[in-house]
Amino acid sequence: MSTHATLIKPPKSLPHHSPIENVLQLLPLEDIGPDIFTNARPLWHPPGARGIFGGAAIAQCLSAAQATIPSDFTVHSMHCYFVLAGNSEIPILYHVERVRDGKSFITRTVQARQRGKCIFTTTISFMKENSGGKEKVEHAVPMPTGVKVPPTSKISVSADDDDRPFESVRCKDITTAQGGGGGGGRVPPSARKLRQWIRAVGRISDCPPNVREEETTTGRRAHEPGDNHQAHLSALAYMTDSYFIGTVARVHNLMRFANRRNIEKTLQTFKGSDAERAQMKKYLEEIAKEEQEENDAFGGSPTAATDSRRIGMMVSLDHAIYFHNPRAFRADEWMLTEMESPWAGEGRGVVLQRIWSKDGTLIATCTQEGVVRLQQEKTSKL
């Protein structure tokens, strides 16, 4: 396969679509086989990462699976595994397998492949709407109180700088599992909770992406006018990977870019233009500032200048999303996420994430495990 970002020439961006809709757009490859799709546009490779942004693979797999189910079924869970680092310069093929079509639940598996190898795989379950009955068992963790919602206007510097289709604002009121602020003493990593507001940039349209065509003999579903909640679900899936496994490093104050040498090292390997290099430098310096603020809020553990511990490797292994209220939110409005890490050890770490809509509805719960290895001291051979 030739080395280029997409298999087919990217279509023109639709003016009525938000940036995240254009980024996540898929194209069906019916001439190659049924239920096979490819990315319509190049995918984002975060600075310093081994491959493409994991959220892109999660969201596009969901979009591909959604294109094979009836319109009255909605996703309720995804279980994903990151197998290989995705290359942003090579097209991705998404292969959907129709595992089961039941009366209340539908199951799909999706493999994302590059150069014939699986780089990402997920099993997705969909539930028929209103199939839970009139009498229900219901409860939900309430949204944290006293967290200020960001203004409606676009304010995220990072979203402008790196052209991401979503923006985020970290909350400065870092808390512990027992409640209260992080100041006044050293807070243990397992008790730390990190929060941020996230939303898609622009407004997600009411028009479904063109991958979801009218129902055909292959089973691709039809959509009612204005029915585009699948785009909000895919956008949410994309954003769930934002700063996720990095929570382990953050609760341990293992700052990646607060050390100036780490920024310079990352810039040395960057192959873009001088303007792009300056843009990346600004992006990394913004992260460094946020890292230092978190370090101070957590009780003043060793600073980046004196802490000898460094992250040697940090990559995601698996990722799960449970969608609780799939039609009770808009992904282009502010959503609050709260992350904590209950355990880390043996070179791995686990992170839990809850996401609420701005009106306090719990819309998703996520988990992620990843490799979190420190740089090891070199020992001389005897």
Image: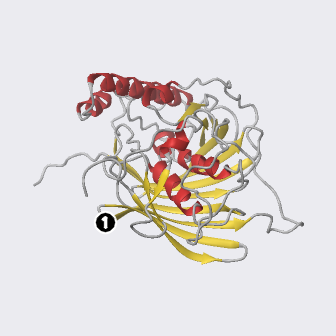
Question: Measured along the vertical axis of the image, is residue 179 above or below residue 115?
Answer: above
Q: In the shown orientation, is residue 86 left or right of residue 150? A: left
Residue 165 in view (yes/no): yes
Of the pair 159 and 47, the residue shown nearer to us: 159
Q: Quadrant of residue 156?
A: top right
Which residue: 57% across, 49% down? 209
Query: Residue 350's spot in the image, x, y percent?
Result: 51, 54
**Going by the picture, which residue comes out furthest to the left?**
382
Instruction: Report helix, strand or loop for mark 1.
Output: loop
Estimate the x, y position of residue 18 in percent, counting from the top left: 57, 37
Return the residue found at the far right. Answer: 135
Closer to the camera, 372 or 54? 54
- Near-viewer residue (4 or 145): 4
- The residue carrying pointer 1 sits among few (fewer than 14), some (14 to 19) or many (20 or more) residues within 10 Å by Cα, namely few
**Quadrant assignment for the N terminus:** bottom left
Q: Which of 15 and 267 is in front in this view?
A: 15
| Amino acid on which disc 1 is placed | Gly
- Does residue 183 sit above or below 193 in this rendering? above
Residue at image x 48%, y 53%?
Answer: 26
- Is residue 191 visible in the rendered image? The answer is no
**Residue for badge 1:** 116
Q: How is the image coloured?
A: secondary structure
How many numbered circles does the render carry?
A: 1
Question: Where's the C terminus, which quadrant?
Answer: bottom left
- Residue 333 at x, y percent in the picture: 67, 36
Residue 375 pos. (x, y %):
30, 45
